[in-house]
Amino acid sequence: MDSINKQQPEENRRDLAGEEARARIKEMADDAKTCFFTTHGSLGDSRGVRPMSVLQADDDGTLWFMSAIDSHKNAELKADPNVKLYFQADKHAGFLELDGVATISQDKAKIKELWDFTLKTWFTEGEDDPRITVIGVTPRAGYYWDNKHGQAVAGAKMLVGAAIGKTLDDSIEGRLLP
C-alpha cells in the first residue's frame, strides 16, 4: 500500500539547506516561542526534557535561552552539550525537530540583550543575578512539518479533498541542514 504522501497529486517534500534552512528554523522558532529542550544525560525526574522559551532566534540559526547556573540542565549540558529541541507553533502546523550543540556562558552583554522583566520570576535579583547563564544552541540538522500556503488554504484543501474523496494535503516536510 502506498503511503498517504504518494496518494496526493502534488509534491509535499522539500529538504532545505544553508541559508534557506536557517531562515526556516528562525521563522518556526519565532512562531512557536517555546520548545521542549532535551538533554542526553538526565539528572532529574524530567528525564532530560523540559519546556523552554526561545528568547531569540538569530539569522545564523542560533537559538538563545536563559538558565540558572545551578540547574540540572546546565549540569547535563556540561557533561554532554548535544541537545534535541522540539517545537510546535500551531495545533495543525509548524512542527520542528532539531539536533544541536549547546554552549553555556555568562556573557553580560548577551544577558542584557535577552533580558525581559518577566524573567525576574526565575532570576529574582534581575539581570545582574549571578545565577543567570545564557545557552546558545547551534543547530546541526533537523526535520520540519508545515503547511505550504498557511492555515486557510490547508483547511480549504482538506474540505475539498474530503468532499471529492481525494487527498489534497497542503503539507510540506523535509530535512534541514543548516
Image (cartoon, rainbow, N blue to C red):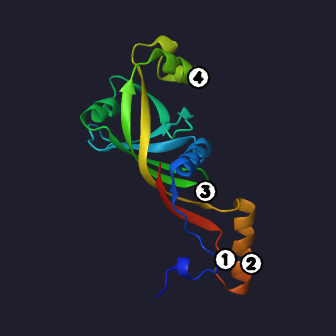
Amino acid on which the number 4 mark rests in the picture: Asp
Mark 4 vs 3: CB contact within 8 A: no
Residue at the disc numbered 2: 160
| Residue 115 seen in the figure | no
Mark 1 vs 2: CB contact within 8 A: yes
Residue at the disc numbered 4: 116
Mark 4 vs mark 1: which is more N-terminal? 4
Residue at the disc numbered 1: 168
SS assignment at label 4:
loop
User: Mark 4 against mark 3, which lies toward the viewer?
Assistant: 4
**Which residue extends farthest front?**
18
User: Mark 3 against mark 2, which lies toward the viewer?
Assistant: 2
Q: How far apart are marks 4 and 1 (CA)?
A: 43 Å
50 lies left or right of 161: left
> Eyeballing the image, is 168 above or below 154?
below
Q: Distance between the residues labelled 3 and 2?
A: 20 Å
Mark 1 vs mark 2: which is more N-terminal? 2
Residue placed at 47% from the left, 48% from the top?
178
Determine crowd level at label 2: few under 14, some 14-19, many 20+ residues with C-alpha closer than 10 A: few
SS assignment at label 1:
loop
